[in-house]
Amino acid sequence: MARPLSPDYDKRKENILQHSAELFAEVGYHKASIDQLAEASNITKSLIYHYFKSKQDILYQCMLNHVELLRSTARGCIDPNQSSEDQLQNILLQFLQIYETAGARHRILVNDLQQLLPEQKTEIIVIQNNITQIFKTLINKVAGSGDQDKNLDTARTFLLLSMINWTHTWFNADGTMTSQELGKLVYDIFVNGVARGSGTSHEP
């Protein structure tokens, strides 16, 4: 008979993931030991193995939860009752809001994807590609289809993603600009051009 899960099983598991992501981001995946992960999560080393098979499994779950959240958020922004412009702006605002509190997970996604098993890495990449396709579709609707030039499709999509995916390295959520204001600025620059979009007095 399987051992019943404790009522706070999911909460404890998420606690381990959050603290592990922060430690991975701070010291690097290879330098972070199970002992350190347990200490950071304020639990015993043996208890970690009740929730995860290995350190690599923790890394995988950190990344998987993050990209699944981004994908579900992106899908939730697709609303046929809204204009394509509103949908694109909404997805930018929501992604940047996520990045406010998920900077550690996003950092390890960028830095440590190669540390996963091949099948785990493939799963993460498939989800990332799903997200990219949602952005590409919205951009084509807003800016016009690039069907005659696939390089244009790709360039526009990754330029926009690059504008938001690296904000975790410099954006200060406690500064004078909120993530929502930053999202609107990114949208304005991308859609209307830097001359118009840069007309803001805020500092990051």
Image: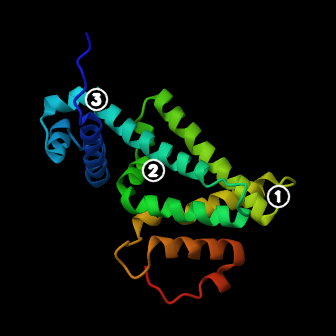
Instruction: Give, as a three-letter code, the residue at label 3.
Output: Ser
The local crowd at label 2, few if under 14, some if 14 to 19, many if 20 or more residues have their Cα within 10 Å, is few
* Disc 2 secondary structure class: helix
Q: Which mark is residue 74?
A: none
Instruction: Give, as a three-letter code, the residue at label 2.
Output: Val
Real-space CA distance between mark 1 and mark 2, rounded to the nearest whole angstrom: 29 Å
Residue at position x 13%, y 44% from top? Answer: 42
* In this view, the mark in front (3 or 2): 3
Residue at position x 25%, y 48% from top? Answer: 19
Location of residue 193 (image quadrant):
bottom right
- From the viewer's perspective, tell me whether residue 97 is left or right of residue 153: left
Q: How far across and down, in percent of the image, does residue 185 sit?
A: 57, 76
Q: Which residue is mark 1?
A: 145
Q: Which residue is mark 3?
A: 54
Real-space CA distance between mark 1 and mark 3, rounded to the nearest whole angstrom: 45 Å
Q: Which residue is mark 2?
A: 110
Is the N terminus in the top left, top right, bottom left or bottom right quadrant?
top left
- From the viewer's perspective, tell me whether residue 43 is left or right of residue 52: left
Residue at position x 61%, y 43% from top? Answer: 129
* Disc 3 secondary structure class: loop
* In this view, the mark in front (1 or 3): 1
Among numbered discs 3 and 2, the one appearing first in the sequence: 3
* Disc 1 secondary structure class: loop
Q: How far across and down, in percent of the image, does residue 40 sit?
A: 17, 47
